[in-house]
Amino acid sequence: MEDDDLLGEELMEEAEQIEAISQLSPMATRKKVTAGPTQKGDGGKPRHTKTEILRSRVSPRQRTSIINDAKSTKVSRKMKNMCVKASPKKRSGVIKGTPIPASSKQLPQHEVFPSALSKKPKSATGSVVSQKPPKGRSGGLALYYSSSSSVTILSSSPRMIDIEAVIEGVKVFMTFVYGEPVTENRGSFWECLSDMSFHRRGAWLMIGDFNEITGNHEKRGGRRRSDTSFLDFRRMLANCGMIDFPFKGNCLSWVGYRASGKVQCRLDRAVGNEDWHHSFSHTNVEYLHLWGSDHRPVLARIMSHEAKVKRNFRFDKRWLGKDGFKDTVTSGWRSSPSAGIGNVHGKIQSCRRAISSWKRLNKSNSALQIEAIKEQLERAQTDDSVPSEEVMKLKWDLCNALRDEELFWRQKSRVSWLKEGDRNTKFFHATTKQRRARNRITKLKRQDGSWAETEDSIEQTATGYFQNLFSSSRPGNFEEALKYLSTRVTPAMNTALTRAPSNDEIKKAIAEINPDKAPGPDGMTSLFFQRFWEVTAQDIITMVKEFFETNSLDAKLNQTNICLIPKTERPRDMTEFRPISLCNVSYKIISKILSNRLKRCLPKIISETQSAFVARRLITDNILIAQECFHGLRTNSMCKTKFIAVKTDMSKAYDRVEWSFLEALMLKLGFAESWVHWIKLCISSVSYQVLLNGEAKGSIQPTRGLRQGDPLSPFLFIILTEALISQLRGAEEEGRLTGLKIARACPPVSHLLFADDSLFFCRADVLQCAELIKILKCYGLASGQQLNTAKSSVFFGSKVPNEQRIAIKNTLGISKEGGMGTYQRRSVDPKNKFLPLSKTGSVAASILGPRASYQKAGRKCLSNQ
């Protein structure tokens, strides 16, 4: 076992060597530390801890021999100094953090400092110490807290100090951890923590040096560990219901050096259970700078509330069925002037104001209602004069309030597979809190490498990034990119696409929009329009028909919020977020009508090599074909010597689509000019704001890009990809590219595409690879697409010579060989296997949190695997 496999044992080996030396008491230099209660000396001043060196009874030659033996081992420089110079400092296992400034009068309350404090700070007057002495020079825990704090020590051991405290009137449990440094002993410690969770009820925080990580993503340097080695630690966190907090700073808290080089790991962390996230929902963690230790201090700030932010209006399904709500909606909608394309936005605003006024007059907070009804029910049940009918009515009111509370948290949790039922509120609440904690943005890295940490600087960084991303590169001539494209849209298709919409078609479009999806800037979900269709129908129908008749769209209806979804566990810069557009339902109705018409024509327009978003085509079709092609590259006598596969990744594919090229492409395919104008109007009249921690910020005016969240976008993107396919087929017909044939009777396969996931096959020849790159560049310059060579890879036939491989990789500009990554959201194994992503380790994240986004079949598959 290599040294870096024993994460957290960075000092174990050194401590054992020191202890071995110290056991040779008549032959070694030893240090004796006398520490005890401070005693009054001369002048009433406290006598400080003394360190005295006991001289050895050995000759200088023997002493030199012993010290040289210690130097020959793999001992860190810090521990060498401890052996030779007999430094009085000792290692503390749990409490790590910065020393308290001399100006501080007492320890700050509600802040937990895990740091390597070797002794009680002089400024910590009025504090209490709970200490576990070290064993030799290994371990040793010390917990400092204010004497005015309400703290009860529940247990203490060499591995943890467990306390009960009261913070802001809430009873909490806090466990300060120094994880077992010996790998073989960790299992029992994790079991001990898991056992504590069985009888522990209430808010619970764990913080400290766990000496373990949850996966290789929390480790840099050293040998890669097997995924199974993390299971015990993950299982403990799951058993205790622990969820990470948002953090700032470098989370790789420990830095050490091994024979293989520098190793960094996230050994220190702070986690809390669902109750803690509920009571102190804005707790955050900061990893401070390294100094005086090989561990970063970790600072946990315990906060129950954040600064007030302006919250957007959101339609709440709990309001449905409440007394007077329907009348409020009706009067609010009709109080605005008559219907019209420019007036629907005004009617929505008027309705919002009426609902807000009704909400203030009618207590709609179900959590407060529950407590009030419980108190009334308690008084009614103990008062013999209260009739049983009134008691029964209070019980029904309580049931309704509980159901409203569950509906509220379900709506916020975005859970799509679990219906309302008994005792689901806690699950929905935990899902919401976990999602908020995961999505909270506390800092962003700028392009110059500096950090934006204030609200204003984060806003400037985010809006600047998107303004640049959505700015057109102004491509010029499209003739080369479209020269192989032929007309595919028939007059009958154009007639069906451009006909006037009927009332039934408009109503059907509204019914197909998911009522639980997040609303746009106006705050109205499709549930509002579905439930109050008789109130809004005339105005909505007029708005939609005027769009088709006048070729105009109110830009206010097309205002859009950008929601940032993390693509990684801890995103650091804007490229690690996926922007999802939250469009107004009033716009989505028009977009849904257009997309419903378009998708009926796609099977006759889109090439068979595209399997995404086309009716009667399965996602698995291209997966099966790709699997056979990879098998041929390994085993087929012709393929394994003369062919390669190239997997490409397009950077921000949807966001870079050039509107002018899409317009020219659709006209070349034969779409009617009126249809093309409608599409351009939908995608170009948009304006953006970015949602940062729940608040809409900035103003972005794009000149390119498709919205992920617009019903039209996926269909428009696969139409855009037809330009690339036409160039590939033209090159095949002219002999500039050769597709892969795995059998004589099989057609050649040169490309397989699933939206922005692409696989290309060609001969293992420098000329053909140069032709492939030329086609991709031509397509990219016209469409705005940009090849990400860092995430692309090339897979060679098993018998392709090494010299040829080097030349091909240089031609392609792709250095990554083999390990094809993922294709169509599945991991590609070079040994002829397409593995589910859960097999490659991403399932661990799902196990640690509520599997809220999985459908029923997905959750069953996850359980079976």
Image (cartoon, rainbow, N blue to C red):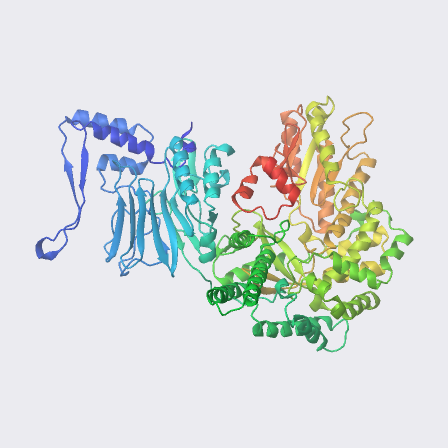
Q: Is residue 780 left or right of residue 790?
A: right
Viewer-side residue, 574 vs 520: 520
Residue 157, x across and y down, in percent? 31, 41
Asked where in the image residue 759 lies, by quadrant, the reply is: top right
Q: Is residue 371 left or right of residue 761?
A: left
Tally the numbered discs. 0
| Residue 245 sits above or below residue 378 on the image | above
Residue beneath the point at 76% across and 44% down: 724
Viewer-side residue, 333 vs 81: 333
Q: Residue furthest right?
A: 491
Viewer-side residue, 742 vs 412: 412
| Residue 198 sits above or below residue 713 on the image | above
Q: Residue furthest top?
A: 637
The answer to whether residue 815 shows anywhere in this view is no
| Residue 796 sits above or below residue 602 on the image | above
Q: Is residue 378 left or right of residue 45?
A: right
Residue 447, x across and y down, in percent? 54, 53
Residue 473, x across and y down, in percent? 68, 55
Residue 733, x across and y down, in percent? 83, 36
Q: Residue furthest left?
A: 42
The answer to whether residue 399 shows anywhere in this view is yes
Q: Is residue 775 left or right of residue 821?
A: right
| Residue 854 sits above or below residue 369 on the image | above
For the N terminus, the quadrant is top left
For the C terminus, the quadrant is top right
